[in-house]
Amino acid sequence: MDLAAQASVCVGIISDTHGAIEGAILALMQQCDVIVHAGDILDPDILRRATPKSGHIIAVRGNNDTPDQWPLGTAHLLQSLPEMARLKLPGGLLVVEHGHRVNPAHQRHEKLRIRHPEARAIVYGHTHHRSIDTDHDIWVLNPGAAGKVRAYGGAGCLILYASPERWWVEEKTLSS
């Protein structure tokens, strides 16, 4: 998807919903221009319910997005979920993957940066722990869990604001 020509874009970033998403997070996502889901969705209805005002959702497959874990009759939708996705934004490229194939975990950020040198930011999930690593030219962002499963510190998400001149991230956490 290419939104690079826009003056600014608001990106809602979620991951690890595991079949449930908090209503307050849904409301935040619906106000964004585009939503990124970094995998472990487990129910395609979450993507429908989280549809932002533009209707644009970028979602990738997580390690738990498997036919036996999705609702009956929805497994065919898994074929439409890529392992990795790219989103062109004003000021740079956002790359999304679940992150479960990038190991060992203590080197994940470094390895993601090596894997995606063209990115301005990389979004991943899998760990259920929020991480906002903006100390390098390529940011690495993990929104934590937006659902009820292992939502350490409470379910949450990130909001990325992108313009050609500046990117910034806001953390949103629901009290647990």
Image (tube, helix red, strand yellow):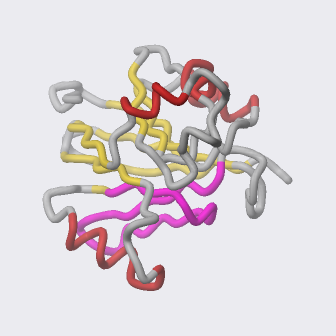
Please, what is the dominant secondary structure of the magenta stretch?
loop
Q: Nearer the viewer, residue 133 or 47?
A: 47
Residue at 21 percent across and 38 percent down: it is 88
Task: Indicate the position of residue 138 as horizontal and vertical percent values.
Answer: 26, 65
- Horizontal side of 50 relative to 35 (left or right) equals right
Residue at 29 percent across and 43 percent down: it is 85
Residue at 62 percent across and 20 percent down: it is 49
Q: In the rendered view of the protein, which quadrant contains the N terminus?
A: top left
Task: Indicate the position of residue 109 as horizontal and vertical percent values.
Answer: 37, 74
Residue at 52 percent across and 20 percent down: it is 51
In the displayed structure, 19 sits above or below 95; it is above
In the displayed structure, 109 sits above or below 19; it is below
Magenta residues, start to end: 122-145
Q: Quadrant of residue 68?
A: top right
- Horizontal side of 173 relative to 39 (left or right) equals right
Instruction: Say whether residue 76 is magenta.
Output: no
In the displayed structure, 86 sits above or below 138; it is above
Q: Number of marks in the image?
A: 0
Q: Residue furthest right?
A: 176
Q: Nearer the viewer, residue 38 or 26?
A: 38
Task: Indicate the position of residue 176 as horizontal and vertical percent values.
Answer: 85, 53
Task: Indicate the position of residue 146 as horizontal and vertical percent values.
Answer: 66, 45
Instruction: Say whether residue 142 is magenta.
Output: yes
